[in-house]
Image: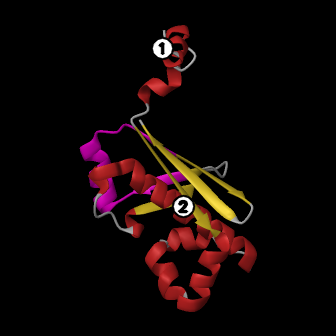
């Protein structure tokens, strides 16, 4: 019996049975900050919805970290959508937050269509920051 079969047989991975897709992305905070300094509000408007921009308000340091986290999460979601999400724009995926502050993906346009075509039932996102990078993972079930 392989290790994977043993884990599955013992019930150690019951939550994994429903995972259908995973996406992950990393964004360098300083690189993003430089891009925003060079291109200004136009690049921010291209990458983030008005709601996301409001969630990123704060000091310039915190703003760059928050933006990087949301951009990484948006790309992780696009990757989780796989071939179904071809042509999804940056604004088709919005990363909001729930009452506890956890990130919540909201899909519109092509991203919503891709989610439906893939026949996913849920989409979950987690964002973390460390050593000048933001990393996000998206899991579809």
Instruction: Reply above or below: 129 against 53.
Output: above
Q: CA distance from mark 1 to mark 2?
A: 33 Å
83 vs 48, nearest the viewer: 83
Earlier-in-chain disc, 1 versus 2: 1
* Residue occupying the far left of the picture: 117
**Dot 2 corresponds to which residue?**
72
Label 1 packing within 10 angstroms: few (<14), some (14-19), many (20+): few
Residue 42 percent location from the top left of the image: 48, 87
Note whether residue 97 is visible.
Answer: yes
**Dot 1 corresponds to which residue?**
5
- The answer to whether residue 112 is magenta is yes
Residue 81 percent location from the top left of the image: 36, 50
Q: In the rendered view, does 32 fall on the left or right side of 117? A: right
Magenta residues? 104-124
Give the residue drawn at x 37%, y 64%.
92
- The answer to whether residue 118 is magenta is yes
Q: In the rendered view, does 140 fall on the left or right side of 135? A: left
Q: In the rendered view, does 122 fall on the left or right side of 84? A: right
């Amino acid at each position: 019996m392989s290790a994977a079969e043993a884990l599955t047989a013992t019930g150690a991975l019951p939550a994994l049975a429903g995972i259908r897709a995973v996406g992950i992305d990393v964004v360098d905070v300083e690189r993003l900050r430089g891009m925003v300094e060079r291109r200004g509000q136009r690049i921010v408007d291209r990458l983030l919805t008005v709601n996301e921009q409001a969630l990123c308000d704060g000091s310039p340091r915190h703003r760059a970290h928050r933006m990087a986290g949301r951009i990484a999460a948006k790309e992780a979601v696009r990757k989780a959508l796989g071939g179904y999400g071809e042509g999804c724009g940056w604004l088709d995926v919005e990363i909001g937050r729930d009452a506890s502050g956890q990130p919540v993906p909201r899909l519109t346009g092509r991203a919503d269509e891709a989610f439906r075509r893939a026949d996913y039932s849920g989409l979950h996102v987690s964002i973390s920051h460390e050593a000048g990078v933001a990393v996000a993972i998206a899991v579809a079930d």
